[in-house]
Structures are given as structure tokens and as C-alpha cells.
Amino acid sequence: MDSGFAEIALKVIVILGGAKLLAVLLDRIGQSPVVGELLLGMTLGPYLVGWLDPKSPILAFLAEIGIIVLAFYLGLIADLDRLLQARKPAIRVALLGMLLPLTLGALYARVLGLGWETALFLGTALTATSLVKSGHLLWETKILHTITGSVILGAALLDDLIALWLLAGFHAWLTARPFQWAEFIFEGVLSLILLGVSLALSVRWAPHLFRIIERLETRGMLIVAALVFCLALAVLAESLGLAVVVGAFAAGLMLEYVPQERQITRQVETLVDLFVPFYFVKAGALLNPFVLGQWGVLVNLFILFSIAIVGKLLSGLGAQPGNRLAVGVGMMPRGEVGLIFALFGLINGILTEELYAILVTVIILTTIATPLILRPLLKRAS
């Protein structure tokens, strides 16, 4: 057997096997598998064990596929009808949950002496709520279909949409340095147009297309067609100068209206289990835990963590009286989109090693803290 293949296969075994084992252990204490994947990557990465190279081309490719699949899955599970059902409080909560962390985070970054572009990026990275984590907690506490659950999920979805729009703008900045507001706004608007056109076409044409595909009755045709569709939109987004995750997310939104949506979602969940761990393990491997031992870094971590918590707690003021605290806590967990921002910022030189470590740690801490606070609140609200 070729030694190169054996080495790669061993790394795949350790990453997938270790991620799944940690996911089982974390699930028993009500925590997200993302935390385990980040910790696994940090442990195996160059700063501790030194066994895993986060800059490996193969890991980079698998991580890229993982983030495309994750964005596709987020689009599939994004229930736009739920957002419309509780649109007024959800929009108020989402806007407060975006503006407060963004403003407070950016202003604090300016206090640290960072430029406006980096400050805006750091503030934006604190805005996105974990749609997957919030949805799982709501389902677990059996209030997914209540008003409280609808507001939290609707607001989390809107937060992710706005964050991806802003990510498209930052992607434009990288291709047109120095920072230009015109490029930033243009690419952001272009991403919204792509999402809007995708939704308009999906309602009209996607159901017909997938009925034809289903009639072919070839094993695996449905998931292959969905994945090809996802990759095609990711490539289209990149060709327009947008981040690939914008195209993949748009593809997921489009397939929400096909008759086979539930079947596709179940099959895509398998792809999520297979590929997404590589992305989060890579993100963990790039984190240098030793910088967290510096006093200045710990102070900044505490302040940014406080901003992340308080900003989302106050977003609950947009909900109905009686549900405000539960909604605010339900908006606290960061996760998938926040980590997309963190890794994007580090790889493209927007974030320093210290800021990256702080941001990923804030995401981990909010993910851990939320279920501990949210479960009793949601039970009381129900």
C-alpha cells in the first residue's frame, strides 16, 4: 500500500472517528459536536501534539467541501415560512441582535487601535446566531412550534442571511484593497440579488426539475442532482466574486420548495456528518491555545464574550413581553456562520492569531453556555 495513502487514510480515520466519539460524549451533556471538533483540531494541531497540519492541501480541500455542504444544509433547513409566521417580532429581534454586537464589537476593536475595516469584520463575526444549535435546543425542549420557537428560529435565520450578505462584501474588499465602500456595498447587494433570483426561480422551476429527476429512478440520482446543483451555484457565486457559501446557501433555499425536500435534507445530513468535521477540525488546528494565556488577550476575551452575550440578550427586547429573556438567551449561541467568519478572517489576513483565538473561544463559550441557561427558561416559557 502506498505510504502516502496510508498517512492520509489514518488522518481521515482519526478526524472522523474522533469527531464522532466526542459528539456522542458531548451530546450526553447537552453540548454541540462543533465544540468537540474544534477541541480535537486544537489538540492534534501544530501548537500541541503537532500531528495535523492545518495547511495540508487535502485537509483544505475536504474542509472546503465541508463548508459548502454546511451552507447548503443551512439553506435547506432555513424555514422561510416560519420567519413569515412570526415576522414582526423576529425581524425586531434579528435587527437588534445584529446591530448591538456589531456596534459594540466594532467600537471596542477601535479602542484596541484596529482599523475600521478589521473592526467592522470583528463586530460582524459576533452577530450570527447558530441556527442549527438553537433549532436543536428548541426541538429538545418541545417548543419548536410555539411562538417563542418561531421568533428565535426566524430571527436566527435572518441573522444568518444578513451575515452572509456582509461576508460577500468583505470578500469584495479582499479583491479590491484598499477597502472601498462601493465595492463592499455592491458585492453585498449582488449576493442579495443572487438569493432573491434563486428563490424566485426555485418556486417556479425547481419542483418541475426534481420531479423529472425522480422519474429517472436511478439509485442515488436525487442526492447527486442536489449536490451538483449546490456545487454549480457555489461556482457561480465565486465567478461573480462572491463567497462560495453564498451560492451554496442559495441552493439550499431553492430546494426548500421541491417535493423531495425532506428526503434531500436527510441525505445531505449524511454529507454533513462526513465532510463538515474537517472544516471545524481545521479551524481548531489553526487556533494557538498559548496566546490565551496572555493577560491582555484574556481581558479582550472577557470583554468580547460579554459583548456577545449582552448584545443577544438585549435582542430579546424585540419579542413579546413574557418571552423576552427566553428569546434573548435563545439567540446567544454562535456557531457555523461565526466560525466561517473566523476562518475566513484568519486565512485572508483580516484577523491576527490573537483575535482569531479570541473569536473562536467566544464561539465555543457561547455554544456551551446557552443550553445550560436556555433549557430551564424554555421549559418555564412553555
Image (spheres, grey):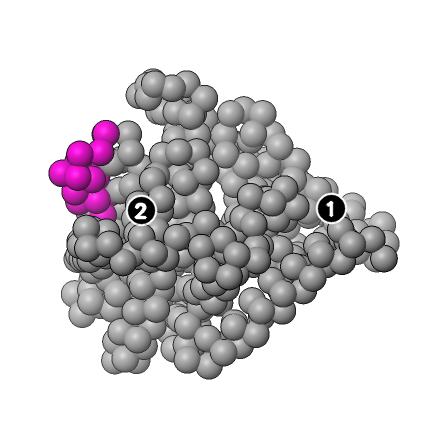
Predominant SS along the magenta part: helix
**Disc on res. 49:** none
Position of 318 compared to 213: left or right?
A: left
* Residue 25 visible in the displayed image: yes
Question: Which amino acid does the dot numbered 1 rest on?
Answer: Ala
Closer to the chain start, of discs 2 and 1, is 1
Task: Say what amino acid the circle numbered 2 marks.
Answer: Glu
> How many C-alpha atoms fall within 10 Å of the one at disc 1: few (<14), some, or many (≥20)?
some
- Crowding at dot 2, Cα within 10 Å, few <14 / some 14-19 / many 20+, comes out as many
Vertical arrangement, residue 192 with respect to residue 25, above or below:
above
Residue at x 58%, y 25% (from the top left corner)? 239
Range of the magenta residues? 101-116
Q: Position of residue 85 (x, y in %)?
A: 37, 56
Q: Would residue 111 be counted in the magenta stretch?
A: yes
Count every numbered label the image shows and give the total. Answer: 2
Residue occupying image coordinates x 26% and y 65%:
329
Q: Residue at x 20, y 40 (%)?
A: 109
Q: Residue at x 45, y 38 (%)?
A: 347
User: In the image shown, does 262 or 4 lie closer to the viewer?
Assistant: 4
Spatial separation of the CA atoms under disc 2 and disc 1: 42 Å
Where 251 sits versus 296, above or below?
A: above
Instruction: Specify whether residue 277 is painted magenta.
Output: no
Residue 351 in the image, given as x and y percentages of width and height: 34, 39
Q: Secondary structure at mark 2?
A: helix
Q: Nearer the viewer, mark 2 or mark 1?
A: 2
On the image, numbered disc 2 is attached to which residue?
354
Quarter of the rendering containing residue 310: bottom left
